[in-house]
Amino acid sequence: MPDLRGIGTFDNVLCETVIMHLERKQIAAAVRRLLDVVKPSGILYLSWRVTENADLRDPQGRLYAAFDAPMVLAELKGATVLLDEEVVSASSGKKIHRLVVKKPGYEIRE
């Protein structure tokens, strides 16, 4: 995701429980890139499964990186946070962090 190129920009971008599968050192760049593809005044929805203390791998080998919300929020500088919550997923029973942010828009000058 940090190297995502050639896809244009969008009014809304949804990234549902994906970034936790990246290595921790890739997450900040991935979050910045996701915000880059949001048009001015657009919305980014971002969620991840919360893994506390240390990275984990499930029996299939999928990575669940341990990182915190402040690390993600630091990469969303200038965006307005519309939702910032942790909930328990009804399907998995795991804690999920959800963020909805609005990217700054163009200034209209008179």
Image (cartoon, grey):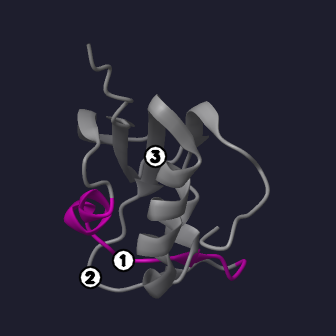
Asked if 9 appears above or below 77 in the picture, the reply is above
The amino acid sitting under disc 3 is Leu
Q: Which mark is residue 46?
A: 3
Residue under the image location 36 percent in, 70 percent down: 51
- Towards the viewer: 40 or 67: 40
Determine the residue located farthest toward the front in the rendered image.
110
Which residue is disc 1 drawn over? 66
Residue 1 circle label? none
| Mark 2 lies on residue | 53
The residue that appears at 24% across and 37% down in the rendered structure is 81
Q: Position of residue 61 (x, y in %)?
A: 68, 82
Q: Earlier in the sequence, mark 1 or mark 3?
A: 3
Relative to 81, residue 51 above or below: below
Task: Of the two numbered discs 1 and 2 on the same chain, state the one appearing first in sequence.
Answer: 2
Q: Nearer the viewer, mark 2 or mark 3?
A: 3
The amino acid beneath tag 1 is Ala
What stretch of residues is rendered in magenta? 60-75
Cα distance in 3D space between marks 1 and 2: 6 Å
- Measure how far apart labels 1 and 3 are at the Cα level: 16 Å
